[in-house]
Structure formats: C-alpha cells, structure tokens
Amino acid sequence: MKAFIYGTHGAEISDVAKPQVKGPQVLVQVRACGLNRADLGMTKGHAHGSAGGAGTVLGMEWAGEVAEIGPDAKGVKVGDRVMGSGAAAFAEYALADYGRLFHIPAGMDFSEAATLPIALTTMHNALVTNGDLRPGQSVLIQGASSGVGLMSLQIAKLKGARTVIGSSTNPERRARLKDFGADIAIDSRDPAWVDEVLRATGGSGVDLIIDQISGPVANQNLAATKVLGRIVNVGRLGGSHGDFNFDLHAARRIHYIGVTFRTRSIEEIRDIFTQVKNDIWPAVESRKLKLPIDRTFAFADIIKAFDHMEANQHLGKIVVTL
C-alpha cells in the first residue's frame, strides 16, 4: 500500500506492507487525514514519544471505513464509518485500537471527521478532566488559533465558562477567535497581555490556563492565574524550556498540571475517548463543536500540505484526502 514515511531521503510517499490486524485492533481504510504540529516535526526526522526516525509511517489522525476487525475488538463492525487517532495514519490503511475510535455522525464527511479526534480528546481532557473547568469560571487558551486551540475555545463555552480569552500572535487569526467563542483575544507577545487579563477578571486572574506555548510565557501565565487557579501544560509551541518563578507559583498556590498522550496506557486513552462520548458527543453530532478546514490536499500532494503548515498562515485544520 502507499504510505507517507520518513525514509532515507526524508519524508516521502513509498510502498509499504499493509498492516495486519490482531487482538483489539481495527484496520481502517483511510479516506482523509488531519495534519498536526507533531507530524511536521516528524517529517524532519524528529521523535514524538516512541515514534519517529527512519522507516516510520507518519500521521496521527484519520477518518475512514472499517475493513477488518481483530478478535478482541468491540463496538465496531466492517463497513462502519469511523474517525480516530493512532500511529501511522498517513497511509491507505491504518491500525487503531477499538477504544480510540469515534463513529462518524450521520451527514458528516470524511474530511470534516478527520479534523476532530485529536482536538476533541486533547482539549476535553485538558479543560474538563485535568483543568476541572466549572460553569461561571474564566479560562485563557494560549495558542488558541491552532486546531486544538479553536476546539478548546468552543468546549470552554459549551461547559459554561463565563469569560473565555484566547491568544494568537497573528493579527488576522486573532481577529477570528471571537467566531469560535473567545470573549477577548490577546497577543501573547505583547508585554501588556497579563494586565489585559487581570482587567478582564477584576484583578484576580483567570481560574484556568490551557497552555500550548510554555517556555516564553511561563512566568506571565503564573501572574495571570488567580490564587488557587490551575495551569494545564498541553503544548510547547514556543519552547520546552524557560525561566520559572517558583516563588510566584507557590505564593499563588497554583496547580500546575502536565498532560500528553505519549506516556498514557491504552486503557487511559480508551477512557478519554469514552469521556468525550459521554459528555460532549451530542454537540459534535449537532455540529456545535466543529473545526474549519483551511485547505484540502490530495494524498499525492501531501508534501505541499506540510509546506502549507510550515508557512504558518492557516486557521483551522489542513486535511489530506485519499
């Protein structure tokens, strides 16, 4: 089968063996894939958790039809339209554990479905499970113009947040954040952004920050979070290292939580998918939670899709179709 791999000449389309289903796995004929920032790094040979390097079939998010089912798989049958996440997504066929699949709602096409699994699971887990967001609270989403960031804004509003603040360093994308639920849009490179957040929260700071930037804004985040507030570290788009004011952290008694899928067991990931289904799935079915598709590329043009992502001028998801 055709697959997009990191090979001897860098990222390229190549012929690889079709994966064989076993145990709790499901084999999916892929119809569309969503691109993510971690994929961009892996096209350059970087590792992402235990994946990466020569021979790796790239990609983490897809939608398609169930082609085969392993003997221990549950809740799916051949022919089901599904979307999910897992390794080796950029290929004609992909394997996934049965527990990290969503059934595609009626009327939703494969391209739209391919934008959703990672954003839904990442941000529901960050906001609700780890962030403990409650109705009436305030939240700041750092890096809000990314696909997962836009989903985070929407989930925050859906769960009853009183004040939702989103950041983006791009003025055009920042101007669009209110379309996705932001009450206030800030520029995290503006030295005065903390003052803006404090003004919006009566001087106390936000109850919760979902941080996708980290390093450069770590201490500003501490200053913008209320006493006994929470910061959930989801991503490190701005850098994985930086100065950290431990005294401010202690003085404000902030709960600082790190999350990633890379070190989670399959049982933990299954639980995250189940929580999404049990809590917010009606809003997915009704399209209250959705992501814009910036551009769609054919699989043969997948390198162009990554060039578009690297240019960093898109809003929403970049999709590749097979």
Image (spheres, rainbow, N blue to C red):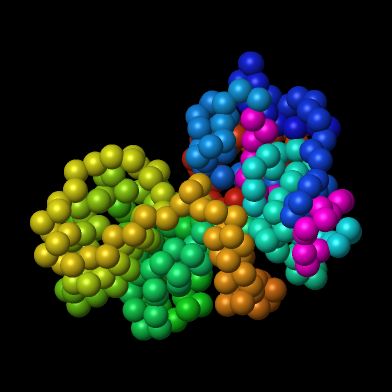
Q: Is residue 63 magenta?
A: yes
From the viewer's perspective, tell me whether residue 313 is left or right of residue 297.
left
Q: Position of residue 158 (x, y in %)?
A: 51, 77
Q: Position of residue 107 (x, y in %)?
A: 80, 68
Q: Quadrant location of the C terminus?
A: top right
Q: Do we see residue 74 in this rendering?
A: yes
From the viewer's perspective, tell me whether residue 180 is left or right of residue 138.
right
Hey, which quadrant is residue 69 in on the image? bottom right
Q: Nearer the viewer, residue 86 or 207?
A: 86
Q: In the image, is residue 272 above or below residue 172? A: below
Residue located at (63% from left, 16% from top): 9
The magenta stretch is 56-76
Q: Position of residue 65 (x, y in %)?
A: 83, 54
Residue located at (75% from left, 32% from top): 3
Hey, which quadrant is residue 239 in on the image? top left
Q: Quadrant location of the N terminus?
A: top right
From the viewer's perspective, tell me whether residue 67 is left or right of residue 312.
right
Residue located at (58% from left, 77% from top): 279
Q: Do we see residue 199 in this rendering?
A: no
Q: Nearer the viewer, residue 34 or 263?
A: 263
Residue located at (17% from left, 59% from top): 249
Q: Is residue 263 magenta?
A: no
Q: Position of residue 112 (x, y in %)?
A: 70, 58
From the viewer's perspective, tell me whether residue 78 is left or right of residue 123.
right
